[in-house]
Image (cartoon, rainbow, N blue to C red):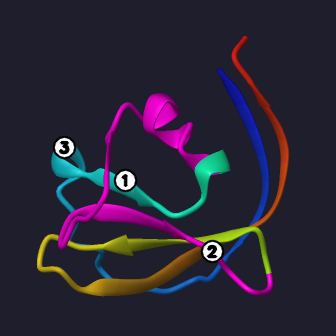
Amino acid sequence: MLLTLLIGASEENEKMNIAPSQLKIVSEVDQLNVLKDILDMDLVVEAKENCILISESEDSVAKINFINKFGDKIKFQINVKKILEVSND
């Protein structure tokens, strides 16, 4: 599977406090649901901690935020500006 994204990211110098083995994906953007396969993570409807939150954005295709193991949204954010390609090769 190939996914090509054009992104921008905010730079924050903070500890993420994420348990990688417990990460799940919550997505409002169907085109990016493929990340569950690429990252080998569960796609769930709702998660209160340890999740990657993919949401719609007014000024880009989507924004990707992280919710840590304490349920706090961290400041680091990825802005998906364009989805260039999604293929199942």
Spot occupied by residue 87 in the image (x, y as percentages of width and height): 76, 23
Residue 25 badge: 1
Residue 56 badge: 2
Type of amino acid under label 1 = Ile
Q: In which quarter of the image is the C terminus?
A: top right
Residue interval drawn in magenta? 32-59
Q: Reading the chain from its start, which is encountered first: label 1 or label 2?
A: 1
Helix, strand or loop at mark 2: loop
The reply to whether the magenta stretch includes residue 41 is yes
Q: Reading the chain from its start, which is encountered first: label 3 or label 2?
A: 3
Q: Determine crowd level at label 1: few under 14, some 14-19, many 20+ residues with C-alpha closer than 10 A.
A: many
Helix, strand or loop at mark 3: helix
The reply to whether the magenta stretch includes residue 40 is yes
Helix, strand or loop at mark 1: strand
Residue located beneath label 3 in the image: 21
Residue 17 badge: none
- In the depicted structure, whether residue 65 falls above or below residue 28: below
Q: Distance between the residues labelled 1 and 2?
A: 14 Å
Q: Determine crowd level at label 2: few under 14, some 14-19, many 20+ residues with C-alpha closer than 10 A.
A: some
